[in-house]
Image: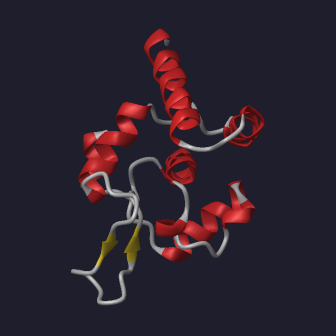
Amino acid sequence: MHVRVSAIVISLAALLFASACTPEEVALYLKVTDHVNHVLSAEELKRLRDCESTDNYTAVSLWTNPVGLYRGAYQFVQHTWDGVAERHFPWLVGKDPVEVEPWWQDAMTRALWSERGRQPWPICGLRV
């Protein structure tokens, strides 16, 4: 438990430092993502992200579809993204995953994992 709490604190410190977010914006993010923050650790997200997109939040998978069906660090399909957003973060419905800030991609991944486990990531989910 202590390791997970430390990882969350480090991740939040990095979020605050790397973004131009105010302390109030960070507090709001923590409040609206609180229900999923426990789902995957920062290390687990990193392993999934490394496998799915080589840690690239703007990745677009063109080899499976010329229009880039799979998008973002966790390779979301748009209808899956929209469904998860509708249930957890409605302001992200219709947003392209590659255009959404990394911390929202992480939150969306945690939300989807909370609902379906590794099923949406049949290969890379084994690395988590």
x and y, in percent, of residue 57 in the image:
40, 58
Q: In the displayed image of the protein, which residue is found farthest to the left?
A: 63
Q: Residue at horizontal 29%, vertical 57%?
A: 52
Q: In the displayed image of the protein, which residue is found farthest to the front?
A: 20
Q: Residue at horizontal 53%, vertical 17%?
A: 5
x and y, in percent, of residue 90 in the image:
74, 63
> Vertical placement of 65 versus 11: above or below?
below
Location of the C terminus (image quadrant): top left
- Judging depth in this view, the residue of 94 and 122 nearest the camera is 94
Query: As drawn, is 97 to the left or to the right of 35?
Result: left
Q: Residue at horizontal 29%, vertical 90%?
A: 66
Q: In the displayed image of the protein, which residue is found farthest to the top?
A: 2
Instruction: Give the total number of marks visible in the rendering.
Output: 0
> Vertical placement of 30 versus 7: above or below?
below
- Judging depth in this view, the residue of 52 and 29 nearest the camera is 29
Q: Residue at horizontal 29%, vertical 59%?
A: 53
Query: As drawn, is 35 to the left or to the right of 60?
Result: right
> Vertical placement of 118 versus 24: above or below?
below
x and y, in percent, of residue 51 in the image:
24, 52
x and y, in percent, of residue 16 in the image:
59, 34
Q: How is the image coloured?
A: secondary structure
